[in-house]
Amino acid sequence: MNKGVFMALVYFAALAGVLALMLFLLSPFLSSIAWAGVLALGAYPIRTWCCRRCRGRQNLGAFLATAVVTLIIVVPLLIILVLFASQATQVVGALQRAEASGHIPGRQEILANPRVAELMTRLEPYLKGVDLKPVLFNAMKAVTALLVGTSKKFVLGAIAAVFKFFIMIAVLFFAFRDGQKMTTAFWEMVPLKQEDKAVIVGAVKRVVSAVLYGIVLTCIVQGILGGIGFAIVGLPSPVFFGAVMVITAFIPVVGTALVWVPGALYLLAMGEVGKAAILTLWGMAVVSSIDNFIRPYFISGKSKVPLLVVLLGVLGGLATMGFLGIIVGPLLFTVSLEVFQVYRREIFPGLMPPSC
């Protein structure tokens, strides 16, 4: 074996070992580092503006940009978390009290509705021997156990989350200050043509912009509007159910309807026909349809990422990596496709792309 090839293999093996060791040491904080990178990329215009205001002083500009991003994230997040925790406690407490007393919330009120009573009378011949009470109690127990378990995990993970948050803020400062240098050094080591590197970098920026502004912000707006709808019609715990709608908004087709449709049906069963109609119209015309208007506004035509790629990346990333996967999933998917295209152009340069 040629000595140069042998030494190159030794260096490559040593580099792979060092990288593996670094990943092992940083594994508890990889999510914080990844979020810092995503925020640095998404908030790069803020960093540019701050550095310009600080007349090119990188340390001061990076500190100011970090402070601005932290305030933008922390203040609204803390307010929402406090309200959510308070209303989640109320929901769990109500379910536990109902379970202990053997009373299903809203059951008597619903049965007092003349239309429901008439419907139950008509269905009585078909419901003989059918007792729905155990089914409803089992469902209540399952929901209560899920909420209690989630609350316990939330409390236990709060300290770790705070620590990881400060790690993320520290990494974000260095990403704002030295991110451009680190990115340049990284791409200098990648054995690709300059134009191929530019294509991959452009794909990364597009997909982060598409997911952050076109999906995450859209789902947050849908959840806020859904919570407003619950508050308008007088349903309890609008912040709690609004937060639930933020999560369900990521589900294709049904999305927020998984929350506001049962709310409208509950109002209808309670005899509140007008409020049920208002919530239904609000859910259909505003909550479930607003993404068709605000997603193009958030993306602003800059992030032309195929919808299927984003959808598969978001769902796969969410299932495997949690909330961080919403960003990382589409990013890995898109970069993999771009690398495949680079390989295709280099290995089969004469192959024409398929025509539509």
Image (tube, rainbow, N blue to C red):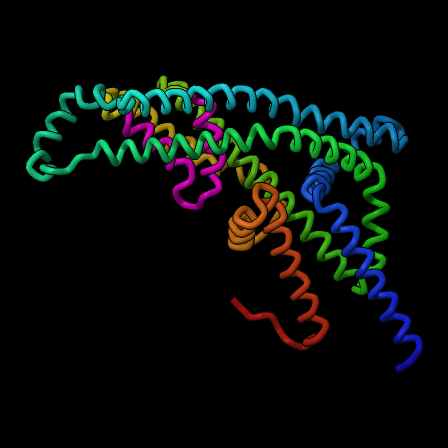
Q: Residue at x 25, y 20 (%)?
A: 272
Q: Which quadrant is the N terminus positioned in?
A: bottom right
Q: Nearer the viewer, residue 333 or 214?
A: 333
Please, is residue 122 above or below residue 330 in the view?
Answer: above
Q: Is residue 244 magenta?
A: yes
Q: Residue at x 56, y 24 (%)?
A: 81
Q: Residue at x 45, y 33 (%)?
A: 245
**Whether residue 300 can be seen here:** no
In the figure, residue 115 lies in which quadrant?
top left
Q: Nearer the viewer, residue 325 or 298?
A: 325
Q: Main secondary structure of the magenta part?
A: helix
**How far from the left and from the top, in percent, is residue 284?**
36, 34
**How far from the left and from the top, in percent, is residue 329?**
59, 51
Q: Residue furthest right?
A: 3
Left or right: 45 in relation to 322: right
The magenta segment is 237-266
Left or right: 67 in relation to 219: right
Left or right: 96 in relation to 315: left
Q: Residue at x 76, y 58 (%)?
A: 197
**Whether residue 2 can be seen here:** yes
Q: Is residue 297 magenta?
A: no
Please, is residue 202 above or below residue 109 in the view?
Answer: below
